[in-house]
Amino acid sequence: MKRSFLIILVFILSVPFSQAQLWKMKRWEATLGVGPSFFFGDIGGYSQTKNILGLRDMTFLQTRFDINGNLKYRITRSVNVRLSMSYALFHATDVRGSNEGRKMAATTSIFEPALIGEYYFIKNYAENSYLFYKGKQGYIKKVLKSLDFYVFGGVGGAAYWVNGNDDLVADTNYKVGGFTAVFPGGLGATLVYSPNLNFGVEVGGRYTLTDYLDGYTSQYSKANDVYYFLNLTITYKLKTGPHGLPSFR
């Protein structure tokens, strides 16, 4: 009788502990993101007196796209670190801005590698379930219990190339490209769709240490250039190998 009681007690105590370790079986994640890019430089835009919070600068005319790939490693259940590689296209034009008479326009391509940390302030309940993890429960019925919310921040760099129109190229301040440090930060949410797949959305800004992402700066500029990504993401979880490395088997 005592032996049976001890077995039951050990089982009861071990289940919560083992469930809490399920995430360690898939500590590596590969993520692909794509979406629109928004650029805020010295070409185009409205003056602050006519532009509350910069909302008038977010126009379809100047919206382009970005695509990025990430390799994530889960340090703890709530903390990730990721290596991010992004390519983006920006566009800036004085058309319909506060400097239409200047007639400048620029298209910028950037390549941005970055090291980013993520902190999940709300974690899902799904991945702690054996039934969900082994695929015996099917899709999670209650979506709210399958959501993650996180903040992220990091440091990286951006190599950029600027293609200006004739009015921009003729200006003495024009620069064709360069490299700058960038500091990403933002918010994201993911939906645990299955033991292997997550879907999500992420919005993040980049503060840069240059004022030449559009190839131009002026005496009236009071801040460096910034840009934003709004990405839809898909994440595939990789099994953790025997030495802690990702397994592709």
Image (cartoon, helix red, strand yellow):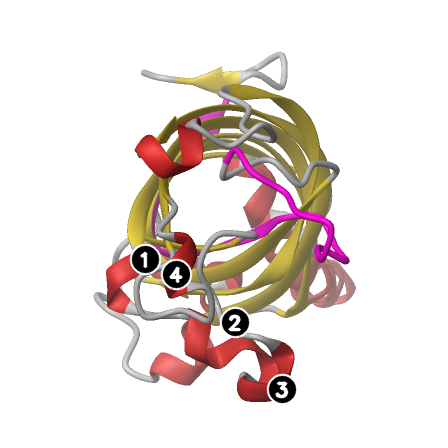
Distance CA(mark 4)–CA(mark 3): 19 Å
Is mark 3 in CB contact (under 8 Å) with mark 2? no
Range covered by the magenta-colored residues:
215-241
Depth-wise, is mark 3 or mark 2 nearer the camera? 3
Residue 170 sits above or below residue 80 on the image: above
Q: Which of marks 4 and 3 is nearer the N terminus?
A: 3
Question: Looking at the picture, how far across and down is residue 214, in whole percent?
Answer: 49, 39
Is mark 4 in CB contact (under 8 Å) with mark 3? no
Q: Nearer the viewer, residue 197 or 54?
A: 54
Q: Quadrant of residue 179?
A: top right
Is mark 2 in CB contact (under 8 Å) with mark 4? no
Say which mark, if any, is on residue 218. Answer: none
Amino acid identity at mark 4: Gly
Circle 4 — which element?
Answer: helix
Distance CA(mark 1)–CA(mark 4): 18 Å
Specify whether residue 226 is in view. yes
Distance CA(mark 3)–CA(mark 2): 47 Å
Q: Earlier in the sequence, mark 2 or mark 4?
A: 4
Depth-wise, is mark 4 or mark 3 nearer the camera? 4
Relative horizontal placement of residue 199, taking residue 216 as reference (left or right): left
Amino acid identity at mark 1: Gln
Residue wearing tag 4: 101
Residue wearing tag 2: 125
Say which mark, if any, is on residue 62. Answer: 1
Is 20 contained in the magenta span? no
Question: Looking at the picture, how far across and down is residue 127, in whole percent?
Answer: 48, 59
Q: Which residue is drawn at 42% across and 83% down?
A: 144
Is mark 1 in CB contact (under 8 Å) with mark 2? no
Amino acid identity at mark 2: Tyr
Distance CA(mark 1)–CA(mark 2): 40 Å
Residue wearing tag 3: 49
Distance CA(mark 2)–CA(mark 4): 57 Å
